[in-house]
Image (spheres, rainbow, N blue to C red):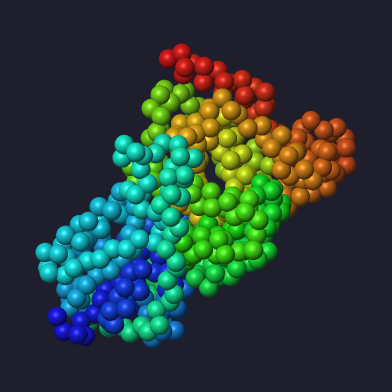
Amino acid sequence: MPAAAPALIWFREDFRLADNAALSAAAQDGLPLLCVFVLDEAALPGAAARWWLNGALRSLDASLREHGGCLHILRGGARELIPALARANGACTVHWNRRYDRTGREIDTDVKATLKASGIPAHSFGGALLYEPWTVRTRTNTPFQVFTPFWKAARQLGEPRPPLPVPAKLTFSRLPEAFQSSELSPQQCDLLPVSPDWASGLRDTWQPGEAPAQQALTTFVSDLLPDYASHRDHPAVPATSRLSPYLRFGHVTPGQLWHAIAQADAPAVDKDKFFAELGWREFAWSILFERPDVATRNLRPEFDALPWRTDPASLKAWGMGRTGYPLVDAGMRELWHTGWMHNRVRMVVASFLVKHLLIDWREGERWFTDTLVDHDPASNPMNWQWNAGTGVDAAPFFRIMNPILQSEKFDADGDYIRHWVPELARVPAAMIHAPWAADQQVLAACGVTLGRDYPHPVVDHRIARERALAAWKELRGA
């Protein structure tokens, strides 16, 4: 093969130059690079994540242009496009970083086989996870079903490899002429909302890209990691990393996070807690790797007989943050405005939908899929199944979160509620967690009349709890 034959770098959910094993391997060989992203309409994420994807494409293209190249975006199916492009460009090899969902794996396998038939080798690399899913197994070589032994076994494999730097030298190849007419700019990808433009809150909150990801990591390590374990459950306190969307789109790798935390000057309890959060993500991906239907089917099949309710009005009230439970409503409005929600509040709102409203967890999973900028196809359904009690290592169904007590414990002063539910801004802390139980004259003096300024609860907590427990007992009896 001529020395100038290029390497095709197929970007997917790895929008970065640093710690990019596929890119580094090709650059180390001194090959000119053709950097490609395939926009497959059938594989696009939810609406909020599409907004982020647009920013990720722009950011990666800008980073490559700083090195003299660019990102070539082509619309179509990767099974056909990647081999055709590699042949047309005379590529000597194709590199990509692995993905672990069933559809992605099947496409990658097919592309690799087609390339091999054309005499073009394909090389895949790890990077999206700390440990490959097939390496963390029980002694009988079966997948773990409980997190604690999974994470213990993973840690025994040793520390992740050190992160790779941005390649010192990058050279680039031209897109073949036959493909130039169909190339898209990021602006032509039709990923942004137009009418209506609901993304103003996302734009105010986030800046997709590798540089913002590194800045967020630096800020977290220096300012927030100390006391992370004790403060992370309080949504009004800026104590979490907010790195999840950057991790989701590969602006930063879990290996980069791991080593930054390991080298930080912070208490071990805070480091270990953050490592465990990375471990939970690894566990979720190990489950998806074995159970690709985790977003659509109960992992515990006995829950298939649970009598879920069909209640469109309550489902809509939940989605819009109009349930009458302030902490639940604050979380859902934060999600709607920013595309993100505090982790503790995610648990509360999920439990409320499943246990208080007795609505199928899959309805909530679909809503989160469409509204989260950090929607993760492994973590999102697994966390929903954890809350619903239908998954592996899940909370028991009979453990029903009390949204009032959760509010009083984790947002005691009501600051988080006041920020996202401004109609309750003047309500004192003693009344804000359950305004329906307050003296209504005092509430009116604060500018709140239930049913006019703020909704009555969609369901009484006691009645909802009894209904959920009755459904669970009925299931056990069946």
Task: Look at the image and tell me whether residue 391 can be seen.
Answer: yes
> How many numbered marks, from 0 up?
0
Between 342 and 442, the one lying in front of the other is 342
Quadrant where the N terminus is found in the figure = bottom left
Give the vertical position of 287 relative to 197 (above or below): above
Give the vertical position of 297 relative to 174 (above or below): above
User: At which x and y percent is residue 400?
Assistant: 60, 29
Quadrant where the C terminus is found in the figure = top left
Classify residue 310 as left or right of residue 32: right
Between 155 and 175, the one lying in front of the other is 155
At a point 71% along the width and 34% down the height, the residue shown is 405
Give the vertical position of 161 relative to 46 (above or below): below
User: At which x and y percent is residue 450?
Assistant: 76, 36
At a point 25% along the width and 66% down the height, the residue shown is 123
User: Quarter-wise, where is residue 71 in the image?
Assistant: bottom left
User: Quarter-wise, where is residue 271 in the image?
Assistant: bottom right
At a point 64% along the width and 63% down the height, the residue shown is 265
User: At which x and y percent is residue 133?
Assistant: 36, 49
User: Quarter-wise, where is residue 354 in the image?
Assistant: top right
At a point 57% along the width and 20% down the height, the residue shown is 469
User: At which x and y percent is residue 255?
Assistant: 46, 61
Classify residue 113 as left or right of residue 216: left
